[in-house]
Amino acid sequence: MAHVQRLWQRFIRKLFRPLLLALLASLLPIASASARVVDLLLVLAVDISRSVDSEEFQLQRQGYAQALTHPEILAAIQSGSIGAIAISYIEWSGADQQVLILDWTVIENEESARMAAGRILEADRSFYGYTSISEAIKKGTSLIASAPHEGMRQVIDVSGDGSNNSGAPVTVARDEAVKAGIVINGLPILNDRPNPFGQLDQKLDEYYRNFVIGGPGAFMEPARDFQAFAAAVRAKLVKEIAGMPDPRPNDGRLAELTPDLQDRQR
């Protein structure tokens, strides 16, 4: 019986999806000729705090640029119901340090992907401050709220190599974003070397799972180090674009965490 019900639900979604897309398109502001309905609104929020040295900074930039132009990513985009996504790329550090590198850009083919990648690579580095994941999430939430496009899904993709140590508690920002209908996915970088400002951030993957990611189907894709970042970004973007959920539950139960992780939720 459950199997029959699932088949019926899929049929209904398939039947009414074109009507929903048409309705969304009709609701877009007439004044904005460039406004689009897209499969996904995606904010890429990238950590450039003081724990990220110049080499690691370049590896992150190159990782995203290479991923956006990879045939696997383009295939995932073009396989969507609409065949287009819109991305915004920000870099962040401390509580008042977020910079918009790439404003909302629609990607639907190789040309638009290369243009977006080029814009990301050419910008100068802005910050070397603390690590405020919470304010990065707030910035992403604000960008989605003011986006000129309508997305069937909204996602903030947070990548970084440290836990929140500046600004509001990360769980507050996460919960506000989820309440607004946004999914937050994470790419924790399990850095393989100490930085000049502190020790290695142990159990960062557990921290991201319990405090950073949130929303239906939220997931994380750890990178074992900065050298593995490009592959992790590509794998993560494919899942986000395709809307693949994480089969593992994320209920945020702090009782299952060690005391040091509970203390680091800020």
Image (tube, rainbow, N blue to C red):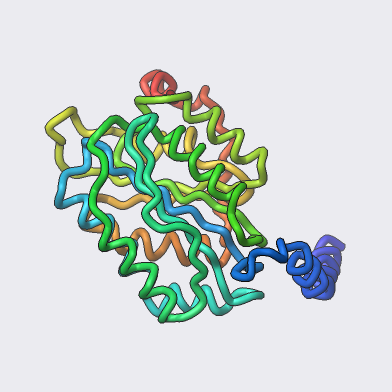
Q: Quadrant of the N terminus?
A: bottom right
Q: Quadrant of residue 237?
A: bottom left
Position of 159 relative to 163 (above/below)? below
Q: Quadrant of residue 6?
A: bottom right
Tell me if 76 is positioned left or right of 193 in this view.
Answer: right
Q: Residue at x 55, y 32 (%)?
A: 252
Q: Residue at x 63, y 70 (%)?
A: 33
Tell me if 110 is positioned left or right of 33 in this view.
Answer: left
Question: Can residue 7 be seen?
Answer: no
Tell me if 53 is positioned left or right of 204 in this view.
Answer: left
Q: Nearer the viewer, residue 171 or 85?
A: 85
Q: Nearer the viewer, residue 136 or 192?
A: 136
Position of 156 relative to 261 (above/below)? below
Q: Residue at x 30, y 46 (%)?
A: 189
Question: Can residue 119 be seen?
Answer: yes
Count of numbered marks = 0
Q: Residue 10, position in %: x, y?
A: 78, 69
Q: Residue 173, position in %: x, y?
A: 53, 32
Q: Residue 253, position in %: x, y?
A: 56, 28
Q: Quadrant of the C terminus?
A: top left
Q: Residue 145, position in %: x, y?
A: 61, 47
Q: Residue furthest front?
A: 31
